Image (cartoon, helix red, strand yellow):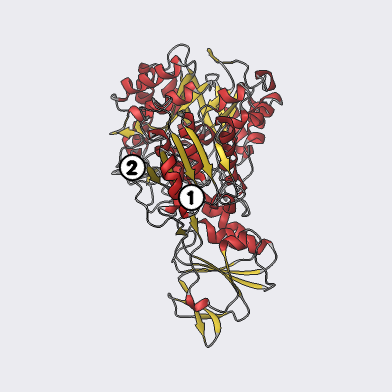
């Protein structure tokens, strides 16, 4: 493929007085690589990665405007703090050095606190509590509104002093500006509430304050939710009315259109791609103002379709560019098979533990390794045993370093337990990481041997001939409990892969304390085949370890499939009858004819006996150390490969 395959995306665009080299935008995604409200070197490195990867514009996120919206951890950038000016100037310089432009998004969270405590009370136009947080907000007085608006002005002044190319007002996702605009959250009866004009008053004060500090040549943007996706929330007709009102000012250079409110706007892999495009198209048509659209757009082909058909002028990506910051350059050069795709699992990138990471890109959130991008001084012979994500990533990075790598996988296909998980309903994007790494094996000349189990004597021979051996043999399903002996019992793997051989109409899927995806995958797979499913867990909460943005869609799918959910349960044999017993109420549910899908966390699979991962010339990584998540496997594989 050549650059001309995406001519619309890779054409320049005039945004106000700025000229963007292309139509791809890195959407605001805060890193939390911040100390005392000031971005640190890791945040700068993240901007440099994005800019060098080829985007036309970077919108920096998670930048707050006032002390009333600062978290106790101070992991959000505080634009009102003068100390951010030099650090922001460094980010602007990094973006410009690589040919990108840099805009900062400003936000006041209002009644929302994004996963952290604050020393300030939450504030809002009206004292209406969000379902996501514990405390009702304080209703802002007119004097306090003036003080918050002054925070927007002083924040803008600091950003202009730092040389940003523009400022974006976050008026989406149910944060403070949106709270003032929405009748659902604004019940005021003074000049800031009631009529549409009054509900827009705060927005105009904010825009006036920012405009008063804008330098010549900088642009002003506004982010809006085309659909808030909550009962009683604003929809596209409201969004268009708001956009028209703002456009009439004449000083706004672009609208950024998204969907959702907090907890809903980061779409996982179970939702459709490019969901906000129709809304962006309507805003663009109604206002004539250049429009930026994002929301689960994962590839340049989709972006090309959006721009070519006039739905939007700019196309934004967040997680896709975290997974692979080089996505624009690789797409422009036709290297599509080399793109590391976003899985949409919302695990590492949304946990912020303690800052941004990525399940498939181990470089994100970690200091740049001194060996990154360099060839090893001495070429080694490296053998990797196991073709799951840990082994594949170790092989990829080692081969990029110039080593001679051979990989052995016992199964006839690469992927390990990820391939099983990807067979579950709504989880197919998981296979993307296996496909990417498999392509990289071919590109880098890794000698891949499938259906090639390594026995103990083979392993001992390998250790003699290799300079380094990586053991990544993965995990296996846990053994069945004794109380299920003699019953019709299946593993999660069998349920997901269609290996349940009986015809029982009722199936109990039992999750013994995991709380993550496997048992839920099984429940969905079994229910899809028309069986009556009881999902039971020993835990006291449903989906307790599944990322927050995925829980709502999962619960809705289980409800729609007729799955009966039971919390705080144990499986028991009562007089020969399979029974669920509630630890909460003591109640019992007899299920005499039910088959069982039983799950507890998987067990390490190490056919070579106990191995010390720190032994000379040997690394033991991934699930065979401790069965965990894709992100753990990838990060351990990367670390081994980069240090060889």
Classify mark 1: helix, strand or loop.
helix
Residue 152 appearing in the image: no
* Residue 636 locus on image (x, y percent): 41, 43
Image quadrant holding the N terminus, namely top right
Q: Nearer the viewer, mark 2 or mark 1?
A: 1
Choose between 303 and 4: the one closer to the eye. Answer: 4
Choose between 625 and 54: the one closer to the eye. Answer: 625
Would you name the residue on which mark 2 appears? Answer: 616
Choose between 36 and 604: the one closer to the eye. Answer: 604
- How many labels were placed on the picture? 2
Residue 335 appearing in the image: yes
C-alpha separation, residue under disc 2 versus residue under disc 1? 18 Å
* Residue 89 locus on image (x, y percent): 36, 19
* Depicted 43 relative to depicted 593: above or below: above
Would you name the residue on which mark 1 appears? Answer: 458
Q: Which residue is at a point 41% across and 48% down the rendered structure image?
A: 127
* Residue 556 locus on image (x, y percent): 59, 57
- Tell me the number on the disc at residue 514: none
Crowd class of label 2 (few under 14; some 14 to 19; many from 20; radius 10 Å)? few
């Amino acid at each position: 493929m050549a650059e001309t395959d995406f001519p619309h995306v890779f054409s320049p665009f005039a945004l106000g007085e700025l000229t963007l080299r292309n139509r791809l935008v890195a959407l605001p995604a805060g890193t939390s690589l911040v100390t005392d409200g000031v971005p640190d070197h890791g945040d700068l490195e993240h901007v440099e990665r994005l800019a060098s990867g080829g985007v036309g514009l970077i919108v920096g996120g998670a930048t707050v405007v006032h002390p009333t919206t600062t978290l106790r951890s101070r992991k959000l950038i505080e634009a009102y703090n003068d100390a951010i000016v030099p650090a922001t100037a460094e980010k602007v310089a990094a973006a410009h050095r690589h040919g990108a432009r840099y805009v900062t998004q400003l936000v006041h969270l209002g009644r929302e606190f994004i996963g952290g405590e604050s020393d300030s009370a939450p504030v809002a136009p009206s004292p209406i509590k969000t379902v996501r947080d514990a405390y009702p907000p304080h209703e802002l007085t007119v004097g306090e509104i003036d003080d918050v608006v002054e925070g927007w002005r002083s924040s803008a002044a600091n950003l202009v002093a730092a040389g940003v190319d523009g400022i974006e007002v976050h008026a989406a996702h149910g944060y403070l500006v949106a709270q003032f605009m929405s009748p659902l959250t604004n019940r005021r009866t003074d000049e800031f509430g009631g009529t549409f004009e009054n509900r827009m008053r705060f927005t105009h004060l904010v825009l006036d304050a920012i405009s008063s500090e804008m330098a010549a040549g900088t642009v002003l943007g506004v982010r809006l939710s085309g659909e808030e996706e909550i009962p009683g929330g604003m929809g596209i007709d409201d969004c268009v009315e708001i956009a028209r009102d703002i456009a009439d000012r004449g000083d706004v250079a672009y609208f950024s259109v998204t969907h959702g409110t907090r907890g809903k706007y980061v779409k996982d892999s179970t939702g459709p791609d490019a969901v906000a495009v129709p809304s962006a198209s309507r805003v663009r048509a109604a206002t004539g103002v250049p429009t930026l659209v994002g929301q689960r757009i994962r590839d340049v082909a989709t972006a090309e379709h959006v721009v070519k058909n006039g739905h939007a002028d700019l196309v934004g990506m967040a997680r896709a560019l975290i997974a692979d910051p080089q996505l624009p350059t690789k797409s422009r050069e036709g290297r599509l098979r080399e793109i590391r795709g976003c899985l949409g699992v919302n695990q590492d990138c949304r946990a912020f533990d303690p800052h941004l990471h990525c399940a498939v890109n181990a470089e994100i959130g970690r200091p740049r390794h001194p060996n990154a991008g360099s060839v090893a001084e001495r070429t080694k012979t490296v053998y990797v045993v196991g073709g799951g994500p840990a082994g594949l990533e170790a092989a990829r990075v080692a081969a990029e370093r110039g080593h001679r790598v051979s990989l052995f996988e016992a199964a006839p296909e690469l992927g390990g337990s990820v391939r099983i998980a990807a067979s579950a309903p709504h989880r197919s994007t998981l296979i993307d990481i296996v496909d990417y790494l498999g392509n990289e094996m071919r590109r880098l000349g890794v000698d891949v041997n499938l259906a090639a189990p390594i026995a103990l004597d083979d392993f001992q021979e390998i250790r003699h001939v290799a300079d380094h051996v990586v053991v990544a043999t993965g995990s296996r399903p846990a053994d069945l409990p004794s109380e299920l002996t003699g019953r019709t019992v299946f593993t999660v793997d069998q349920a997901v892969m269609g290996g349940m051989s009986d015809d029982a109409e009722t199936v109990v899927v039992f999750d013994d304390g995991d709380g993550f995806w496997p048992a839920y995958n099984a429940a969905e797979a079994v229910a899809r085949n028309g069986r009556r499913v009881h999902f039971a867990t020993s835990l006291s909460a449903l989906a307790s370890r599944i990322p927050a943005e995925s829980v709502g869609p999962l619960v809705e799918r289980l409800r729609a499939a007729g799955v009966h959910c039971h919390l705080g349960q144990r499986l028991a044999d009562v007089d020969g009858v399979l029974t669920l017993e509630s630890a909460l109420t003591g109640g019992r549910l007899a299920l005499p004819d039910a088959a069982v899908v039983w799950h507890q966390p998987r067990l390490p699979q190490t056919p070579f006996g106990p191995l010390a991962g720190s032994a000379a010339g040997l690394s033991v990584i991934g699930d065979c150390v401790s069965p965990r998540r894709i992100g753990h496997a990838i990060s351990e594989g990367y670390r081994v490969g980069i240090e060889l």
